[in-house]
Image (spheres, rainbow, N blue to C red):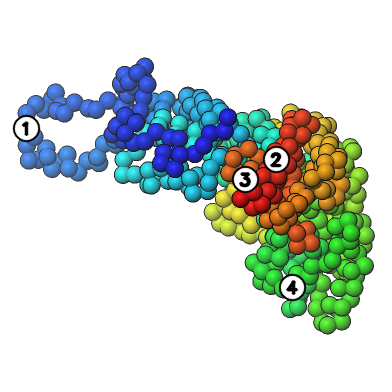
Amino acid sequence: MTAKWSARTGGVPRTSDRPEHTGEPVRRPADTAEQATPEARPASPASPASPGKETGAEAAAAADQPAAPPARRTPGPLDPAALAGGVAGATALAPLLDLVLESLAKGTVERGGPAPAGSPAAIAAAAATAVEHNPLPDKGIGAEPALAELSRLIAVGSADPADPRCVGHLHCPPLAIAVAAEVAAGAMNQSLDSWDQAPIATELEPWVVRALAELVGYQPDQAGGVLTSGGTESNLMGLLLAREFAPTQRPRVYCSAAAHFSVQRNAGILGLGEDAVVAVPVTADQQMDPAALVASLMADRASGHRPIAVVATAGTTDFGVIDPLPVLAAIATAHDAWFHVDAAYGGGALFSDRLAPLLRGLDLADSIAIDLHKFGWQPVAAGGFLTRRASAFDPLTRRVAYLNPTDDEDLGYRSLLGYSLRTTRRLDALKLAVTFRALGRTGLGVLVDACHDLARHAATAIDAHPRLVLAARPVLSTVVFHFQARHRDPDQVNAALRRRLLAEGSAVVGRTEVDGRIRLKLTLLNPHATTADLDALLALVVEAGEAEDTAEATG
């Protein structure tokens, strides 16, 4: 049964429910004994050789001595100041991770569904109550209550993509093995802006990038790449390199009308101007229209504009459509424009023998965005940016004395600083390397195919239902449709039924617009969901739709 949020307490203990905490480490009874090492014990207040009061000369001599360092204590298992690394790190982490897992399990049971039931106001109140309207008190409450309460709160109040009824977005349920790898990466806390901050991480990421380059069809010895925060950052980098490839005062960037919004926003960030982006019309099947692209290119050239980039999409957000990549690559080459492919969604389809042929021509791109926190089942963030030639990264090269001095690099201390827009950068390669080695391409392909099968089943079920209307057959794992209203405005009904499901905490269904009309969307990224799960979900949609369709008429 789905838990209902309480606006007063949000399902977490009130201050009066907790034992008072003084700010000292909270330890379990077995950990209360003094654990100071012999070196940490305070010295005797007076030297045996000099009993009694010090003379003036002795006091003056003592004043000249440096102060003794504070005693170093050995942290207890639930000490909030304990470190995650070092020899004692695993000992400190183990009980904390046990506590997190226990709290997540309790919170998930309490939530009882794919999302928290209740209004946005009630959920906002629960967050405020959980931190007592002040997440930074003067005195801490201790490790156990802080970690247990907020871990449970997150489980209770989250949309859980591992639930088969959570299908609203390109938001995958992460693999347990990838999350476990994240713990190791977090504990080591490497920063990839210099070799001496991340020795093995600096050597590991290029291997993961090489694997991705091979996956997309690049020559791995010639390609370049870096891990990113996701498609938006990767698309930004693609446009940045396009700008540097062909500097001009009157640039034009071309993408389909169904392309991701980040293309236009990134053009503004880069100083190209959002109005430099031309939205090319799409065909009936939602692909970029090559003829319309050529017409736009020719018209813009005639008016003095310089095409710098053609951005194709391999997996649109709504329909999962893949643009005609070989044709678009040829057009971009003919106009001396950078060819970037946003394969943030569709790139993972390359794991599947069944779906990989849909991405024919991807290897013709100058640069590619790919996300593994979609088809890849990684915790956010797990994006990649790849270039056909490593030299494309030359505009990002920077020499910083304290990070990548030349003589260090000459002696093998390589730097990845010139591959990223970020300086501090975490070890995202670990979870990918672990997942790739554990499952292999074939194992990941099985997961992709399972999601594709679910989408085909959902489309067939929707097509067969008298109250549901399918917008298009699925290409990857998204299914767009709407509930057919009979009494009220269809757009109002479809918008309201989605909010009804959210308020009940019974389902998270996506929403989009097609030709100005509100449509519903299932984004199926849970390979362990079943056709029975989908049938039950669609039954909920119909039930909510019927309730909303008759609400005004019966009211």
| Label whose residue precedes the other's in the sequence (1 or 4) | 1
Give the label on residue 53, or none: 1
Q: State the separation of the CA atoms marked 3 and 1.
A: 79 Å
Q: Residue at x 69, y 49 (%)?
A: 549
Disc 3 on helix, strand or loop? Answer: helix
Mark 3 residue crowding within 10 angstroms, few (<14) / some (14–19) / many (20+)? many
Q: Is residue 553 above or below residue 79?
A: below
The residue that mark 3 highlights is 500
Give the label on residue 448, or none: none
Disc 1 on helix, strand or loop? Answer: loop
Amino acid type, label 2: Glu
Q: Position of residue 46 (x, y in %)?
A: 14, 28
Q: State the separation of the CA atoms marked 1 and 2.
A: 88 Å
- Total of numbered circles in the picture? 4
Mark 1 residue crowding within 10 angstroms, few (<14) / some (14–19) / many (20+)? few
Q: Nearer the viewer, residue 389 or 307?
A: 307
